[in-house]
Image (cartoon, rainbow, N blue to C red):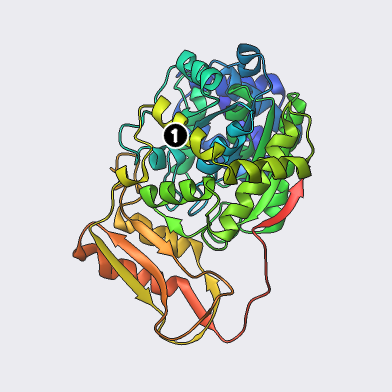
Amino acid sequence: MIFPAELIQRKRDGEELGSDEIAELVLGYARGEIPDYQLAAFCMAVFFRGLSSHETFALTEAFIASGETIDLGAMLGRKVVDKHSTGGVGDKTSLAVGPIVAACGVPFGKMSGRGLGHTGGTLDKLESIPGFKVELTIDEFVEQVRTVGMAIVGQTAELVPVDKMLYGLRDVTATVDEISLIAASIMSKKLAAGAQAIVLDVKVGDGAFMKSIEDARRLAELMRSLGEQAGRRVVCLLTDMDQPLGAAVGNALEVREALETVRGHGPADFAELVLDACSRLLALSDLGVDVVEGRRRAETAMTDGSADEMWRAWIEAQGGNPDEAALEVAPVVREVKAARAGVVERLGAIRIGNAALHLGAGRRTKEDAIDHAVGVVCLRKRGDTIAAGDVLAEVHARDESAVDEAVREVTAAYELGDHAPPARSVLLEVID
Ligand code: URA
């Protein structure tokens, strides 16, 4: 039997805890036998002292043991691949990657979450499609991946239930942004959901959890090692989140942009990231292709209409209307114009994310309702040369009352100067 206060004290003093001690603490909390305040104190001790890689793996295993696991590969008789992003502004990558990878003949089964704060969640984006159902049973999920080729659903309550409890606690005790806790939280869900190979998109910059490339690298290496210890192949892409990804930020706007990208007409930075992720996923799959051939196949699926067909089949299978015209459009659209000529030196991701949030595209608390139609479209990005009066962005709003504040925020997000910033591609580094 463990004494939680003693474990908290030992962690506070920088000791390494045993795997069995960590398991008992986490599972005792999951059963409701250990109170919130002791786990909150434990998380704070971890925040200051960190966890060794041994402890982080034990924490991940304890998270997984708090619920059910799915062996997707065995259920489908195929190697299943998955992707995950640590979250950013305008990040609709899964919506485009899924249909492209599935159109190339690789089963894509993904469990996703909702957004909180300035980053949007995949499920919220999908729910802007009229009729789309994100809640499938595990059997329905597996059957859809088998028959259609792909499914993206909400994380079931049975998978890693303690993560939801603990995330809520971390969120209100300033202990979310600790690398071991983030790694265990993300990887436990990926490992429990059963994919054998995983591409992790670790965002770096202003709009991401990880503000520096060094921290992003540490998180990526830790998640990769947790995956490998559990016998899974993990490739991490470190990608730029100093500016929003693509142009659209806001649920229906992002769905529309993802569909354009699936059809080969997406914004350059977003299309590039989608192709990077697809080629890595195909190279990890059972197709027996390398990254170069994976990229060629992904490009073909985007141009020959097969990814578009897969989009339609997938959305219909989950009860949604796949037509672009069915997506809700915001009643008020206001252009944001450049006050001077120059070059876009910076486009702050957080500021754009917050503008979309204040328009109603995101949630400030878990209970908030989302307005699927609203958001921001960033027509000009870092490095673009502009003339005075050029349209930089569009604000899509529910009514006039919300527009002025959003226009002010979007204007402040654009830093115009006289010097082009160094060119930087969206993919910063690959950890393979
Ligand atoms: N995403 C997660 O799922 N968990 C974290 O702790 C942080 C980001």
Which residue is at a point 58% across and 46% down the rendered structure image? 303
Residue linked to disc 1: 312
Q: In this view, does 405 lie above or below 299?
A: below
Quarter residue 4 falls in = top right
Q: Position of residue 340 (x, y in %)?
A: 44, 87
Q: In which quarter of the image is the N terminus?
A: top right
Residue shown at 55% from the left, 61% from the top: 206
- Residue under the image location 26 percent in, 66 percent down: 403
Instruction: Identify whether 255 is placed above or below 318.
Output: below
> Which corner quadrant of the image does residue 137 belong to?
top left
Left of 121 or right of it: where is 404? left
Towards the viewer: 375 or 321: 321
Dot 1, crowdedness within 10 Å: few (<14), some or many (≥20)?
some
State whether residue 402 is above or below residue 74.
below
Query: The C terminus appears in which quarter of the rendering?
Result: top right
Q: Where is residue 322 in the image (x, y as percent from the top left)?
A: 38, 37
Task: Compare residues 335 and 301 and report the one nearer the observer.
Answer: 301
79 lies above or below 56: above
Number of on-image labels: 1
Q: Horizontal and vertical percent for residue 253?
A: 39, 52
Residue at 64% across, 33% down: 104
Find residue 296 and report its horizontal and vertical position in percent: 71, 44
